[in-house]
Image (spheres, helix red, strand yellow):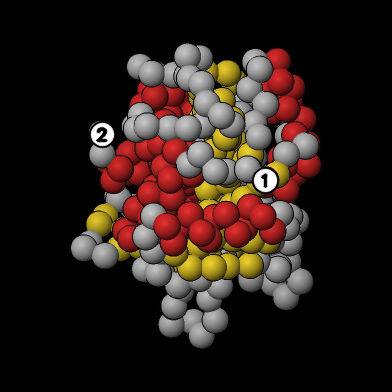
Amino acid sequence: MNSLELLKKYCEAFGPSSAESHIRSVIQETLQDSHQFITTTHGHLIAFDPEAKGDKTIMFQAHMDELGFRPYRYMSDGYIELSPASPIPENASNQLLIFFPNMVLGILVIDKQERQHRYFLDIGAQTKEEALERIPTYSNGAYKGGEFHETPNFLCGKSFDDRAGCAVVSNLLLNQPRRNNRVIGVYTVREESGNWPIPELRYALLEAGLKPDLVVNVEVCPGGPTPLGVEPLAILGQGVALTHMDLYYISDSSICQFMVQLARKEKIKHQHMSERSGGGELGAICNELGVTGYSLVIPGRYMHSPHSVISRNDYETAIEMVHAIARSGDILRK
C-alpha cells in the first residue's frame, strides 16, 4: 500500500472523539503483519516491533480521532440538538453527518447566535420518539464527507486532521530502512475534545519498557492562502512545517536546531511555524513522560470542515522528515 492509498484508507474511516474503534482497527489492519499492539483503557494505540533496537527510542505520535457530535436533546418535532466535541466552523451548516451504530445520515443545521451557536440534526424524523429510535442517546456522529480526491498538487478529503499525521507515522512503521533509533508509533484518542487521557499512556509505555527519549508529534494545522483574507501561519506547498512552539509547549532550542539542520542536510523542503493561539497534546505528553518533544505540521485548508485540502508536497516531505529523524545517529546527542 503506497502513501496515498494509506491516507485515503485512514481519511475515509469513522472515528470521532471517544468512538475511535473503527479507525483504530483500520490502523491495526495496515500494520498487523509487522507489529505488536497495546491498547489502553480509553483506546490509545501503541504499535511497536518487539525485536527492534537502537541508540534512542523515538515515539512518533498522531491523534486518530476526528471531530465528532453526540445527541444532546431530542425535540418534539423530530430534530436532535447536538453537542460537538470541539468548535465547528460556520460553513459546516447544511453538511451531511453520519451517526453510528445505526449508520443514519442527517443534515447539520447551525443556529448562529451571537454568544453561542446551537447545532441541530435533521434526519427526516417527525417525532421525538422516531428520532430516538433511529439515533439512540449513545450514538456518535461525524462528517460524512466526500471521497478522497487527488490532483497533481493537492489532496482533498475528510479528516486530514489528523489522519494525515496517522498515515505519516504508519508509513514510517511499514517501511524498514536502515535506522539508528528504535521507533514506536502511538495513535492517540480524544484530542479534538481537549480531554486528553495521557496518564494511562505513560503507564502502558513504562510497563512495556517503551519509554521514549523523544516524542515527535505529526499534526495538521490551519494553512493557506484562502480567499478569506486571514494571514496563514503556514503556506500549502512550501513543505513540512517545523514547529518550534505552540500555546502549550515550547520545544527545547537544541531540538529545534537539530530539526532545522537535519532538514537542510537531507534537502527536505520545509518551512517554519510558531503557534501562539492554539496547540495540541504534545506538551501534555512530554510533561507526563518527562521527555522532550517536537512537532511536524502539515498545513491544511478549511480545518474542522467536512472537506479539507492539503498539499501533496507537504504530506510527502513530512514522510521524508520522519524517516530522516528515525535514521539519524545524532539526535539528542549533546
Q: What amino acid is at disc 2? A: Met
Residue at which label 1 appears: 334
Instruction: List x then y, in percent, for residue 144.
Output: 41, 48
Corner quadrant of residue 315: bottom left
Residue at which label 2 appears: 1
Q: Is residue 49 above or below residue 187?
A: above
Helix, strand or loop status at disc 2: loop
Q: Is residue 276 above or below residue 56?
A: below
Quarter holding the N terminus? Answer: top left
Q: Residue furthest front?
A: 334
Q: Is residue 5 left or right of residue 43?
A: left
Mark 1 neighbour density, 10 Å: few (under 14) some (14–19) many (20 or more): few
Residue located at (56% from left, 29% from top): 55
* Closer to us: 131 or 288: 288
Helix, strand or loop status at disc 1: loop
Q: Nearest to the eye among marks 1 and 2: give it.
A: 1
